[in-house]
Amino acid sequence: MTAVPGRALHYVFKIGDRSKNSFFFRTILGMQVLRHEEFKEGCDAECNGPYDNRWSKTMVGYGPEKSHFVIELTYNYGVKSYTLGNDFGGITIKSKDILPRASEFAYPITKQGDKSVLTSPDGYKFYIDDASSGSDPMEQVELHVTALKESRAFWVDILKMQVLNESQDSIVLAYNKQQTALRLTVLNGNLDRAKAYGRIAFAVPAAVQEPLFNEVKNVGGTILKPLIALETPGKATVTVLILADPNGHEICFVDEEGFSQLSEVEPNAAAQLDKYIRKDPFQDKTQQ
């Protein structure tokens, strides 16, 4: 298979409290609510994890998913927390506004070396680069791996991502240099995905999905979900392929044609999220 014309879309976090996360992502990080969807039963592609229950999906970011890397917050009704593993490293955001906002609201800022770190209510780390950003402040997503050579072979040779930078203990990848990059960093010790494991998503042309599926299948790679169509009521249907890398990191490839329609920004998304937080029987009303 030749070069893949892919595009980084989003990273999926499981969250246990929508009210606390709404405050963190909207007020502290300054993201917009782009879409909000409610579902009565589990997703066929396990978008909400291995749960067959009512759940919601909220997309947040600094602009439309057509041009920005965003975050998908999946919430399973009644599940208040998830055991955090060591598979996720963090997301780097370039912004001069976040740290002053965090200070204004007395949100904890910690240091990891020379990096300023904000931690979400569920324990996910965000590294804040206190500098002016370009069109998309989301600079990089970091995942931990156990063997860089094996990971490089999968992400570069099979998934056809471009190498932007590499060292002895990490490699930075992207489908093009203008988008949010993926950093794979070697972890000392065993990797544990626990219950809070996430998923990274990319868009590719529909014509690329089957050759990509065959490429992974031919090398004995892990296919979590073969090509399936996912329907969202009132919205475009998308075809998805779910893979896993050598460390079990989940990777979703959606068709660009369908997803570009599905990912349109909803003008009432923030109001919808707020409404369902207020109606949530599992929500601690004292936090609102």
Image: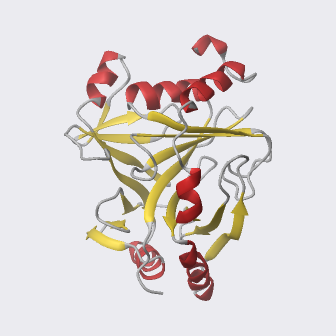
How many numbered marks does the figure carry?
0
Q: Residue at x 46, y 67 (%)?
A: 146
The answer to whether one can see residue 151 in this image is yes
Residue 134 vs 255, above or below: the answer is above
- Picture colour scheme: secondary structure
Relative image position of residue 22 (x, y in whole percent):
52, 28
Residue sitting nearer the eye, 183 or 186: 183
The answer to whether one can see residue 253 in this image is no
- The quadrant holding residue 236 is bottom right
Residue 239 vs 198, above or below: the answer is below
Q: Is residue 263 left or right of residue 28?
A: right
Residue 106 vs 33, above or below: the answer is above
Relative image position of residue 272 (x, y in whole percent):
62, 28
Q: Residue at x 65, y 14 (%)?
A: 285
Relative image position of residue 233 (x, y in whole percent):
73, 47
Q: Is residue 157 left or right of residue 257?
A: left
Quadrant that contains the C terminus: top right
Residue sitting nearer the eye, 258 or 147: 258
Relative image position of residue 128 (x, y in whole percent):
29, 39
- The quadrant holding residue 209 is bottom right
Q: Residue at x 53, y 30 (%)?
A: 21
Residue sitting nearer the eye, 216 or 6: 6
Residue sitting nearer the eye, 270 or 124: 270
